[in-house]
Amino acid sequence: MSMTTPSASRAAPWGPDAQTIGLVGLAHGTSHFFHMLLPPLFPWLIGEFSLSYSELGLLVTVFFVISGVGQALSGFLVDRVGARPVLFVALACFTLAGLAAAWASGYGGLVLAAALAGLGNAPFHPVDFTILNKRVSPPRLGHAFSVHGITGNLGWAAAPVFMAGVTTATGSWRMACAGAAGLAAVVLAALVWQRQALDDRPGRTAHAAQASAVAVSDHPMAFLKLPSVWLCFSFFFWTTCALSAIQSFASPALRSLYGLPLAVTSLVVTGYMLAGAAGMVIGGFLVAKVQRLERIIGVCLVGSGLLLAGAGLGVLPGLVAVGLVALAGLGTGIAGPSRDMLIKRAAPPGATGRVYGTVYSGLDLGFAVAPPLLGLLMDRGATSGIFYAAAGALALAVGSAAWVGTRVAAAGAAPRRAPA
């Protein structure tokens, strides 16, 4: 005899799901925008404050050290007090970060801006995935993860255009920072206005019965014993090292290798992120059709790594090299929704915030560690190494994903093999 639940026999209405997905996506895009608050301004900051690439890379490190430590801790906070209030505080920190950058009178002021932005960024993945997993109907989670990734890439893509565009139009990078602060304030106001769609408290979510039916019976730190959690952590670390190479140094590296003007190479990050966003649309559909998600991840990341290594050879026509780097974003984008679903499958019930906070802190660690090392490569003229390092990091990420997928598949098969 088969049993069906109302949620299984009748699809939940699209309206509430779409509202929640859209608002979480808007917030996520804003967080990624503030990853890039300062890097697009590096050419102007070098001129005004006489900074080296290593010093600029350290600003990125400050952001992601604070974000990484805060992300691991904020997962526990989200599980305790709920995601929505933490989200509002995070957006307020972004506003303060933009204002601090606009008023910076030296390197110390830029460090303060990076620290405030990192504090604001810290809770976003525990917040986002807690809200999505609790409020969005299960059949639409793949699309929710896809939209979440797309908006993040759009935030990354928009930041260089906005920051450099406002600076060029006004002649002042400080005006660009003030504009970013205003953007964060507007997003915060919009989310407070529509706050009912972000309410993840027990009894208020679209799937309250399901949410209250699971709980973690072990110690709150028991999930840290799971190898899959740390394998997911390492996966994020390596993929982020690759992404950091593109975001922070692909443009100057291409200028050095191929002699292209800044007006051309500055578009490579935007192209990479837009290709990634397109890939995530495809990836959202693949999640529902493929059981062994690590295979999608492996094929896509290996392809992206080969494209980046090709750009680093320095023998291609310059515009072709720019195109290869941008196209590499397509593979990482397709892999994105599969990555997020793989983490959901690896996470124990009732520990959403903690697991996502810990796993995604690998992203922050990658962004913290990679920029200073990559900056040293740039300072020493080893510009091809930027692309080779990115390709190598993607290859290591494939290994981590394959291991996670194998463990998840084995765990899923174990109950079926158990004797009746």
Image (cartoon, helix red, strand yellow):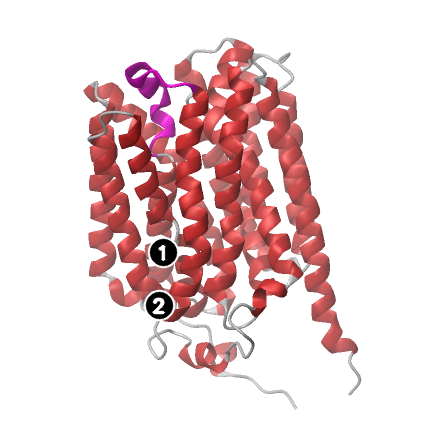
Q: Which residue is mark 1?
A: 24
Q: Residue furthest front?
A: 108
Amino acid type at circle 2 is Gly
Residue 109 image offset from top left, x and y in percent: 26, 31
Residue 165 image offset from top left, x and y in percent: 28, 24
Amino acid type at circle 1 is Val
Q: Quadrant of the C terminus?
A: bottom right
Q: Nearer the viewer, residue 74 or 31?
A: 74
- Residues at circles 1 and 2 in contact by the CB criterion of under 8 Å: no
- Please tell me in which quadrant of the rendered image residue 346 appears: bottom right
| Horizontal side of residue 372 vs 186, given as left or right | right
Q: Residue at x 63, y 64 (%)?
A: 226
| Horizontal side of residue 5 vs 19, given as left or right | right
- Please tell me in which quadrant of the rendered image residue 66 appears: top left
Gap between marks 1 and 2 measured at Cα: 14 Å
The disc at residue 352 is: none
Does residue 39 show up magenta in the picture? yes
Q: Which residue is mark 2?
A: 82
**Range of residues picked out in magenta:** 37-52
Magenta span dominant secondary structure: helix
Residue 111 image offset from top left, x and y in percent: 33, 34
